Image: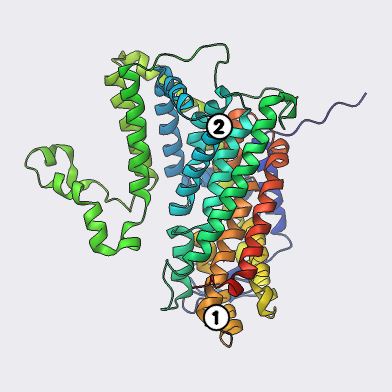
Amino acid sequence: MMKKFKMPTAYTIVTIALILTAALSYFIPQSVVNPETGEIVFDAIFSGEGEILQGQGLQPFGLWDIVLAPIQGFQTAADVGIGILMAGGFLAVLNHTGALEAGIGALLTKFKGGVLIAVMTLAFAVLGTSFGFWEEIVAFVVVIVPTFVLAGYDVMVGLGVLFIGASVGNMSSLVNPFATGAAVSAIGNPELSIGSGIILRFVIFGVLYVVGTAYLIRYANRVKKDQTKSVVHGSDGIDNLVDEESSLPEFTGRRKASVTVFMVIILLMIVGFIPWEELLGQRGADIVNAPIYGLAKIPILGTILGASHISPFGTWYFDEFAFLFFAGSLILLFINKMKETEFIDVFTDGVKDLLGVVLILAISRGIAIIMGDASEGMSITFIYWISNALSNVPIWIFGVIAMGAYVLIGIFLQSTSGVAGITMPILGAVASALFIGSSLGSAGGQIILISAFVAGVNFVSSIYPTATLMGSIELVNVPYDRYLKFMVPIMVTLLAISGIIIGIAPYLGLVQ
């Protein structure tokens, strides 16, 4: 009797992807981006002195490189890794106090069923569309999944709220500086700003949110009525991250204070990550940062707090992300009057729980190291081929084909800002040439290109086995094939809807 096939672990999948990527180097030449002209030089590498050496692009990676890549990946992902570990420690302490479950219980009494799903999906969609919320998903899995499990759903509803919500936001990227902002900057057209095309992107955001939320609610209702309808039904070892036999604890004063700390952390993250100077200009950014500047001017207190060294809102990244969760952990220590040994044991247990996620992240970053970056590597070669294929397509279908091209590009290079920096100077010129004689003009063509870019690249992130995705499903032990069974239908639908809207946008007056 044949043994039933068991889906490999996340570690195995990303390792196989690493090996396959290295194998491509025996057949696919590297290419580089000329730093002076911004043009791609096919089949070339940089010398040690930075000179471009043409005809030497085939640079095979061997066993040494394959084993070394995750180690180098761990180094490059250190800031993200520390952030994830600190979040794990904080959430372990929050869970230990009972505040999280008590807060969830209070939330469940206020919002029910489809409303709960709609509200939380919208929250993560807003985070995605404003600052590209994605890698941070891992830290939220341990909060959102239990919320929906306790509401009577399965783990996939919680994962869906996170991944579908964030995908809706990222695929529209209303003001995302790492996608829309990077694309506008890379094109270099003075007629464009981060607000160019915002009407089109807002329509995409609204339609995708409605469709994605409807899909989630429909699935959730079906699973709540019959758990055998769950896509993870029959899978062994699913971890719903809650003790189903325990009742929700009382929402006491200390637990309310603990949850308030968590909410303040989330608020500070949002305020810290939103690019205020990009959106409001220097004066607007100064207004947002007025509390920090004011605190720094207070004698003695400002010095003791180190207020003059606080990173301004709008410039935060994973160092500040880690700081918030570590500082929050210390505040919880005092609020809940925990003993030192108790706090250390709980905090380190939380860190250990997410160490596997960091290891997966390291291997995934190793893949990126072998594939190449925004200036050289096999990634540039794939972008070169795809860019050439788009140069002669008809105007009416340009946006749809460009979106499909970015889906392919997203497989080889997941950095939205990196993809924008490499492709937009090239495809922006293609769009300008195609649309310059139309009523939309060159800027209109480039607006369509930007919408196609954010939709295509961010679609890939939702299903491609990146560190964020694989780390998240590893936390709840959901097999990758079951995740795809749940996500692929809705994500393909959202991609198709985006393509339709982009295709008809010029005829509806949405390109402005």
Image mark for residue 440: 1
Image mark for residue 356: 2
Whichever of callouts 1 and 2 sits on the residue coming sooner in the sequence is 2
Contact, CB < 8 Å: mark 1 with mark 2?
Answer: no
| Front tag of 1 and 2 | 1
- Residue 192 x/y as whole percent: 44, 74
In the rendered image, the quadrant that contains the N terminus is: top right
In the rendered image, the vertical position of residue 378 relative to residue 122, given as above or below: below
Q: Residue furthest left?
A: 299
10 Å neighbourhood of mark 2: few (<14), some, or many (≥20)? some
Figure disc tally: 2
In the rendered image, the vertical position of residue 215 relative to residue 144, given as above or below: below
| Residue kind at label 1, given as amino acid type | Leu
At 59% from the left and 75% from the top, the residue drawn is: 41
At 71% from the left and 29% from the top, the residue drawn is: 232
Q: Is residue 23 left or right of residue 108?
A: right
Identify the image quadrant of residue 384. bottom right
Image mark for residue 74: none
Q: Nearer the viewer, residue 63 or 441?
A: 441
- Residue 247 x/y as whole percent: 50, 12
Between the C-alphas of marks 1 and 2, the distance is 50 Å
In the rendered image, the vertical position of residue 33 relative to residue 379, given as above or below: below
Which color scheme did the rendering employ for the protein? rainbow
Q: Is residue 134 left or right of residue 152?
A: left
- Residue 162 x/y as whole percent: 54, 40
Identify the image quadrant of residue 220. top right
Q: Is residue 467 visible?
A: no
Look at the numbered disc 1 and give the secondary structure of its residue.
loop
At 71% from the left and 23% from the top, the residue drawn is: 236
